[in-house]
Amino acid sequence: MEPVTSRGAVPVVIGPAPARPAAAGAADASPARAGGQPARGSSARLRGDGLVDRWGRVATDLRVSLTDRCNLRCTYCMPAEGLAWAPDETVLKDDEVVRLVRVAVERLGVREVRFTGGEPLLRRGLEGIVAATAALRTPDGAAVGTALTTNALGLDKRARSLAAAGLGRVNVSLDSLDRERFAAITRRDRLPDVLAGLRAARDAGLGPVKVNAVLVRGVNDDEAVPLLAWALEHGYHLRFIEQMPLGPAGSWDRGDLVTAREILDALTAAFDLVAEPTGARGAAPAETWTVRGRPGATVGVIGSVTRPFCGACDRTRLTADGQVRSCLFAREESDLRGLLRGGADDDTVADAWRAAMWGKKAGHGIDDVGFLQPARTMSAIGG
Ligand code: SAM
Ligand code: SF4
């Protein structure tokens, strides 16, 4: 099957890969602003090359969604009734996931693989997929970094087996320490299970354990300081994520967004924060601060909406049903599942993946007049 790409066809090799732009500042992060024009030779694609886009960015960080299903219903992510889940036959089997990850690591320059969803702990074969990924080596013989983004329900029982399988790190999503608020946000009364999962992850050595928090206006927007105090006490690395227009239709209102600025104002009123040195951020989405007087403690803010970092983005995404997305906000996907099941060899799959990434847009465009929310929500894409 011909992969569907934003460019319609696999581009042809005519020249060397464009150079990566100099690291862009957080507030001036679109490649259009950072680098000026798209790289020349815009139909360039080198067999054996990595995942280069026409703005010169190189994707080395793969996000793999293992399921679009979830056992929570966070208001900013999913409607209360859930979604129309992907039919089972469209979801990649374990061996198909592992094959695509292998192609990405061995042929496309991917060095970090993060498993997500939906809720990745719902995937029975997770340990096996992690073990197969951890056994991969890049062409220069390096091990691949592995990580999991999870709501931590059931992690208390699986943290050890995941660590034994070779999992490196865990990010746990937790928006409130108040049981009633947690239940209001997630529509499930499961805060104690999340806290148990977090402890188990730390005890199993899946660290540094990061905690992701989304603040919602009028619900938990007063919890920035208590969440950081709690994270410092328990040795977790807290990161706040600005809410993005990737949830149920009508659930996002820019005017209601709890911004990175507001979060930082609240934190700096209570803690002595020291910004990480310029340039230390690399492609990381979070701006990070250390907390004076607390050795090793950090807090991050991911200002996806008000402080976009698209110019430094190094991500490529694979959905649970085998579609490559160049961006969370992409409106196009490229079908690798059809290629796999149609008998395509690894070269063909790799070429289709490169072509998909070549078409990556300069930025997410949330501020553009014509911005349209992607048809799939965060849980279906893989956050
Ligand atoms: N279920 C897992 C979890 O919650 O960690 C993994 C998938 S979830 C989609 C990944 C991350 O996306 C979570 O940290 C969640 O808070 C975040 N997220 C979901 N919807 C979001 C939105 N509309 N804006 C910002 N972050 C969102
Ligand atoms: Fe589930 Fe994660 Fe979405 Fe919450 S954010 S509904 S835990 S996929």
Image (spheres, rainbow, N blue to C red):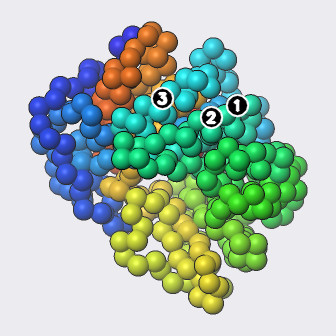
Answer with left or right where residue 90 lies relative to residue 189: left
Which residue lies under the disc numbered 1? 125
First in sequence: mark 2 vs mark 3: 3
Residue beneath the point at 83% across and 51% down: 156
The reply, left or right, for residue 252 in relation to residue 71 is: left
Q: Distance between the Cα atoms at labels 2 and 1? A: 6 Å
Please tell me whether residue 135 is drawn above or below residue 254 in the rendered image: above
Where is residue 24? Give x, y as percent. Answer: 30, 63
Separation (CA) of disc 2 from disc 3: 11 Å
Give the SS element for disc 1: loop
Location of mark 2 (residue): 129
Q: Left or right? Give the position of 60 relative to 286.
A: left
Residue underneath mark 3: 100
Amino acid bearing label 3: Leu
Question: Which one is nearer the viewer's eye here, 108 or 76?
Answer: 108
Please name the residue shown 67% across and 24% down the image: 85
**Rendering quarter of residue 34:** bottom left
